[in-house]
Image (cartoon, helix red, strand yellow):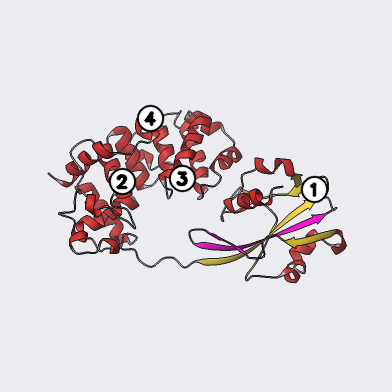
């Protein structure tokens, strides 16, 4: 029995049950794939349910406000996925007259859709013979075939895609693609693979060479950038608080946060209150009190950045034009770092 047939048979007996596996509607499959990019299914499932509940049709998603979408996405991270989802929904509704792209080539035209996502949708919804290659597939193929080419190198990306395409079955492409991804997630997992229960234990190269935990191979990681954030939680009169919208193309675009002062290193109170940005807010130093909420900085890790964060709680009788009611604070989409503070501070 060949590799693809054996894997498909395993899947039909052992597949995990998810709501997106009960449909071939492209909108739902696309939605699930975008949510599950760089996200575990256990974390992504509640978000998928929230989104199909709020936006049962692509027209609903297209007509929604970006702020509403970002609020629903809050806590999932990689917010560009949500913005791209919204952009592509509007494109499909307004430019394609609500007709979802029906092949791999046209799916690639959607913002935020790359080779993997286009292959997944095309194979699952339209049974197009496109092989998916995600982290699970890289791991299964690298171990089974004993491939040592780094998966994040240009050579590796090409090599694994060609191999994945070559071993596709002759039919049921969508089922097979889901099979290899499920197998990688449940049996051939990253840290604790269940080699004893593996259907390929007699033919897996990595298992025979005792190199399971060494594969797949990645080249050295991108250097982590360290940033030092100081948030000013300004509680002004009449239970008002300042919240600013992040702009530009950096992290957390269009999400909201407290006034931020960033330094190159960790700072103490005196350095904060003598900074030009702080003094632009508080010219009269007698009109406020300030206290550090977290004596030990909070380390918030992003993919290529580590944010060393302090929250400074400031009470003042000064009124600010851009303040909002504390009662409305939870209506705004904020990064997880800010959301965790709001929950802990208990306004």
Mark 2 highlights which residue? 181
**Which circle's residue, 4 or 3, is located before the other in the chain?**
4
Label 4 – label 3 distance at C-alpha: 22 Å
**Which circle's residue, 1 or 3, is located before the other in the chain?**
3
Instruction: Characterize the local packing of mark 2: few (<14), some (14-19) or many (20 or more) Cα atoms within 10 angstroms.
Output: many
Mark 4 highlights which residue? 25
The residue stretch that appears in magenta: 297-316
Residue 43 badge: 3
Q: Is residue 111 left or right of residue 309?
A: left
Q: Main secondary structure of the magenta part?
A: strand
Label 1 – label 2 distance at C-alpha: 52 Å
Where is residue 72 drawn, in percent x and y?
55, 39
Label 4 – label 2 distance at C-alpha: 20 Å
Question: Which label sits in the foreground, 4 or 2?
Answer: 2
Q: Are marks 4 and 3 in contact (CB under 8 Å)?
A: no
Foreground residue, 211 or 158? Answer: 211
Question: Which label sits in the foreground, 1 or 3?
Answer: 3
Residue 321 badge: 1
Instruction: Report helix, strand or loop for mark 1.
Output: loop
**Which circle's residue, 3 or 2, is located before the other in the chain?**
3
Query: Which residue occupies 24% across, 57% down?
Result: 143
Label 3 – label 2 distance at C-alpha: 17 Å
> Is 312 covered by the magenta stretch?
yes
Query: Which residue occupies 31% across, 47% down?
Result: 186
Instruction: Report helix, strand or loop for mark 2.
Output: helix
Q: Quadrant of residue 145?
A: bottom left
Question: Which label sits in the foreground, 4 or 3?
Answer: 3
**Which circle's residue, 1 or 4, is located before the other in the chain?**
4
């Amino acid at each position: 029995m060949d590799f693809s047939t054996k894997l498909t048979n395993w899947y039909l007996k052992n597949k995990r049950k998810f709501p997106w596996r009960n449909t071939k509607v492209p909108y739902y499959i696309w939605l699930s794939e975008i949510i599950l990019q760089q996200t575990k299914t256990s974390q992504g499932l509640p978000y998928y349910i929230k989104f199909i509940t709020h936006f049962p049709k692509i027209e609903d998603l297209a007509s929604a406000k970006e702020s509403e979408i970002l609020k629903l996405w809050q806590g999932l991270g990689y917010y560009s996925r949500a913005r791209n989802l919204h952009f592509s929904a509007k494109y499909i509704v307004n430019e394609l007259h609500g007709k979802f792209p029906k092949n791999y080539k046209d799916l690639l035209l959607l913002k935020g859709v790359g080779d993997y996502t286009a292959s997944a949708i095309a194979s699952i919804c339209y049974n197009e013979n496109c092989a998916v290659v995600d982290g699970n597939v890289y791991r299964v193929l690298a171990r089974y075939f004993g491939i040592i080419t780094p998966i994040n190198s240009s050579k590796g990306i090409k090599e694994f895609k060609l191999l994945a395409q070559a071993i596709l079955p002759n039919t049921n492409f969508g089922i097979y693609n889901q099979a290899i991804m499920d197998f990688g997630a449940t049996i051939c997992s990253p840290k604790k693979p269940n080699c004893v229960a593996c259907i390929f234990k007699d033919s897996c190269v990595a298992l025979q060479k005792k190199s399971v935990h060494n594969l797949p191979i990645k080249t050295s990681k991108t250097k982590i950038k360290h940033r030092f954030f100081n948030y000013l939680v300004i509680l002004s009169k009449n239970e008002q608080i300042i919240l600013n919208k992040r702009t530009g193309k950096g992290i957390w675009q269009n999400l909201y946060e407290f006034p931020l002062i960033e330094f190159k290193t960790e700072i103490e109170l005196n350095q904060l209150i003598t900074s030009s940005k702080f003094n632009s807010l508080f010219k009269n130093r007698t009109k406020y009190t300030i206290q550090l909420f977290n004596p030990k900085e909070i380390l918030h890790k992003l993919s290529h950045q580590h944010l060393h964060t302090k929250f400074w709680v400031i009470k003042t009788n000064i009124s600010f034009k851009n303040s909002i009611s504390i009662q409305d604070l939870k209506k705004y989409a904020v990064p997880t770092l800010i959301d965790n503070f709001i929950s802990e501070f208990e306004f």
